[in-house]
Image (tube, coloured by chain):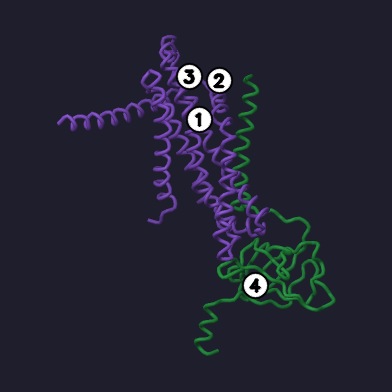
Amino acid sequence: MEKLAALGRLGLEIIASLGRSGRFLAGVLGGVSKPSVAFPLLVKQLYSIGVLSLAIIVVSGLFIGMVLGLQGYTILSDYGSEAAVGQMIALTLVRELGPVVTALLFAGRAGSALTAEIGLMKTTEQLSSMEMMGVDPLRRVIAPRLWAGFIAVPVLAAVFSVVGIWGGMLVGVEWLGVFEGSFWGNMQASVSFTSDVLNGVIKSVVFGFVCSWIAVYQGYDCVPTSEGISSATTKTVVYSSLAVLGLDFVLTAVMFGDF
Amino acid sequence: MAQRTTEVIVGLFMIAGIAAMMFLALQVSGLTPKAPESSYTLYANFNDAGGLTPRARVSMAGVTVGSIREISLNKETFQARVVIDVNGSVDNIPADSAAVIRTSGLLGEQYIDISVGGDTESLDDGDTFYSTQSAMNLERMISNFASGQ
């Protein structure tokens, strides 16, 4: 009976947390600030969330593209169709790896930092003192971070895909000697802008929104102790990764599945 | 950091994103293929272009000398009209050479192989190949064989 009660408490806690995060999101998106106030805050967050994540995105994209080029060449050359390596790299990156890996890296690089920052603000009662001064912390602190993540992830994903394709070309064309015309020709013949590139962008927009939402909510909702911050940071990374991978399957099924 | 510097860097970041999208649109999904530099144009008419695709390679003796620009249907002869860009450095293809569609490997992509002739005249910009050989069609070969032709 005690265990049943514990299970019930857990269920109630999960549902309550989902409800709180929904109300939190409505509060953040509902409060519209003056552009003159909000814009500098947004730019500052775009810098710390987006620009500073560029390094890890570019390096990961380059190496993932190079590995795809190597692996694809090894497999495809068995069938004499190594020229298809370009289309394989491009489709893999644009449809799947670009949005997904970018979102996972974003959750680890920027999401955890967001949670820790907001969590520490809450723990040191900066958020409550803002409220005392009549400044809405949702508008002042949370909203710029949420929007910055929402904007930054699609940009980072596009950069990731491009760098990856370039890395794949480096290995495939420059190193292994696939003819450049077939590399790009096969790619252009098989990648369609609307169904591949734009669907990839939609994916990264969704992932960016979910990752930043989870990050700022976990920070805002954390238990205001040092332990609470550390567990909230862990939760951000774990929940973001699971949400991205789960949503990726759902989105792929909706976009590319034939049913 | 000064607000202005941050704004400039973020502006560059957004431009990088837009440039990446442009690259994905133009180069990866091929909305407008870029023109190759220093080349001349030849034409070839095929009865069956098979699985030939634009930007596929054109080779002589196994060496790549150009690429296919476009493939269209000639509405008068109902043949496939293939526009070929040949590198400017290869300017002495004999005029009686033949364009042959071949497949690289068993499952590979199709390409055009220029089978070299013996004429002293050479093909110039805008010329058409005198003789061509269409893509090998396995189904047609089998059905011809089965019907004893």
The residue drawn where x is 56% and y is 61% is A76
Label 2 vs 1, first from the N-terminus: 2
Specify the farthest residue to the bottom. Answer: B148
The disc label shown at residue B101, or none? 4
* Amino acid type, callout 4: Ile
* Amino acid type, callout 2: Ser
Specify the farthest residue to the left. Answer: A1
* Amino acid type, callout 3: Arg
On screen, B149 above or below B121? below
Disc 4 on helix, strand or loop?
A: strand
The residue drawn where x is 40% and y is 13% is A128
| Dot 4: chain letter | B
State how far apart marks 3 and 4 are (Cα). Answer: 66 Å
Disc 2 on helix, strand or loop?
A: helix
| Dot 2: chain letter | A
The disc label shown at residue A36, or none? 2
State how far apart marks 4 and 1 are (Cα). Answer: 53 Å
Which residue was labeled with disc 3? A140
Label 2 close to label 1 by CB (< 8 Å):
no
Which residue was labeled with disc 1? A110
In the visual, does B43 lie left or right of A100?
A: right
Q: Which chain is green?
A: B
| Dot 1: chain letter | A
